[in-house]
Image (tube, rainbow, N blue to C red):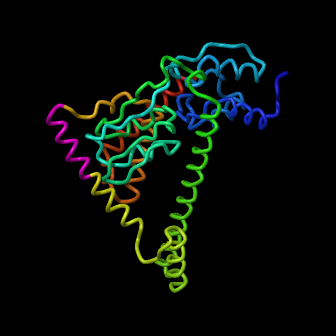
Amino acid sequence: MTVTDSRTVADRIEDLLPQTQCTKCGYQGCRPYAEAIARGEANYNQCPPGGAEGVERLADLLGKAVIPLNPDNGVERVRPVAVVDENLCIGCTLCIQACPVDAIVGAPKQMHTVIGKLCTGCDLCVAPCPVDCIAMVPVTDGLTGWDAWSQEQADAARQRYERRNARLTREREAAEARAAARRAASAGVGAGAGVSATAAADTSATGSSNEDPEAKKRAIIQAALERARKKKEALSTQGQGPQNTEQVSADVQAQIDAVEARRRRLGIAPEATDGEARHSTQEGAGSADDTHSTHS
């Protein structure tokens, strides 16, 4: 019998998804995709990591016929793991920001490493890398779909994804609190209280009111980006520039654009020129049209 409670359906659908958070389904994670299926806005054959068995599981839950995986979303494949080339990594942190399950460790200006047993093989770290130092290496000996990914791995990935989102929310709220306190102080509204509020917000977020963590972060990232620029120029001269910057998916390009926008807000990247802004807008419109066409 088909379940009709939308909340219950979304929860049960999410339980059947592999939790790779790869966005290949066209949504920003497994939970949004599950909710879209429950609302009837997405089909249940859009998850390549789940493969044919995943489609069968969802069809059984929803009381529908088993249908082929939609090739527009990708193909069922041997599960890969991301591997960083230590000789090329420049420590830019863009891959860390892109990883949805915190499977990459490293620091600005330091070599990054992927924790293989935590990697879901989502591919999201590949396109942002400015020096093309990340490779996706198959690790499941020909096994695909749920044969290459256990329920225990899916549950663990889901927990890491949720913890990461919770952490990002706390960091965003702390940054907003600091910004609000600074605005209040600069506007002269309760100057003394505003200064105290700023210090309190900084202390709450970083544990210390004696330094500006945002300024320190900007300086570190700017230095890393300068190293990245010089490295890219050297590689380009040798004909070894990045190979993964063309024909990326709309979802990945949106993530790259979001990172660049955040860098500009933090003051660690130049503002886009009018021409670049128009080009970005046109590309975004084209990507949106392509995505709409793909999933219509």
Q: Which quadrant is home to the C terminus?
A: top right
Quadrant position of residue 95: top left
* Image coordinates for residue 285, horizontal then vertical, percent: 45, 34
In terms of secondary structure, what is the magenta stretch mainly? helix
Say if the magenta span includes residue 227: yes
Q: Which residues are magenta?
A: 226-239
Identify whether 200 is placed above or below 117: below
Q: Is 274 positioned to the left or the right of 147 in the image?
A: left
Q: Residue furthest left?
A: 237
* Image coordinates for residue 290, horizontal then vertical, percent: 48, 26
Identify whether 107 is placed above or below 63: below
Q: How many marks?
A: 0
* Image coordinates for residue 202, horizontal then vertical, percent: 50, 72
Most foreground residue, 227 or 274: 227
- For the point 23% across and 34% down, the residue is 241
* Image coordinates for residue 74, horizontal then vertical, percent: 50, 21
Q: Is 134 positioned to the left or the right of 64 in the image?
A: left
Quadrant position of residue 148: top right
Q: Which quadrant is home to the N terminus?
A: top right
- For the point 61% across and 16% down, the residue is 52
Q: Is 17 positioned to the left or the right of 64 in the image?
A: left
Identify whether 178 is placed above or below 244: below
Q: Residue furthest right?
A: 1
Say if the magenta span includes residue 233: yes
- For the point 56% across and 34% down, the residue is 20
- For the point 60% across and 34% down, the residue is 153
